[in-house]
Amino acid sequence: VLTCFFGIGFMFMVGGSVRNYIAKADDNKQDEYEKLWEKFTEETEDGALCLTLAHLCVQATRLRISGTLPLPGGQVPPGLAPTASDAWCLAFSGLLYAAFIPIVDLCVRVKFLTRFKG
């Protein structure tokens, strides 16, 4: 999960540098359309990062609970019979993730990415 976060974060920083270079290539300053381009591109990148990290966290939780990764479509592998304990552990993990969202939203700021201000 951390490798994904830092890998994608690095790609976003490189992409931001390329966009900045392109935006300033014609007149050495950003006009309003280039700023809008930057804003909407960053929102799209942020959404992609969040979805990727959420998917990886869920799959890592499933691996920890069941001991095996799900099939590519998300199905339970053949022969694996989840127990009631697995179901409770998954429900508890879901509640922890839900409680973790406001904590991260209110308390954590990523300092090395300039787009996250707070």
Image (cartoon, helix red, strand yellow):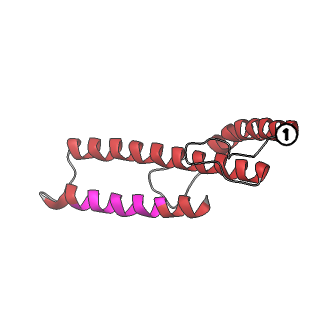
- Residue tagged 1: 83
Please say if 14 is above or below 58.
Answer: below
Please say whether residue 37 is visible from this viewpoint. yes
| Nearest to the observer: residue 115 or residue 62 | 62
Instruction: Give the SS element for disc 1.
Output: loop
Query: Image check: 8 left or right of 101?
Result: left
- Mostly what secondary structure, the magenta segment? helix
Query: Three-letter amino acid code at disc 1?
Result: Thr
Q: Is residue 46 magenta?
A: no
Please say if 1 is above or below 116.
Answer: below
Residue, far front: 79
Please say if 13 is above or below 34.
Answer: below
Region rendered in magenta: 8-21
| Nearest to the observer: residue 36 or residue 46 | 46
Please say whether residue 117 is visible from this viewpoint. no
Residue at 71 percent across and 47 percent down: it is 62
- The percent coordinates of residue 16 (x first, y second) are 34, 58
Q: Is residue 11 magenta?
A: yes
- The percent coordinates of residue 52 (x first, y second) are 53, 49
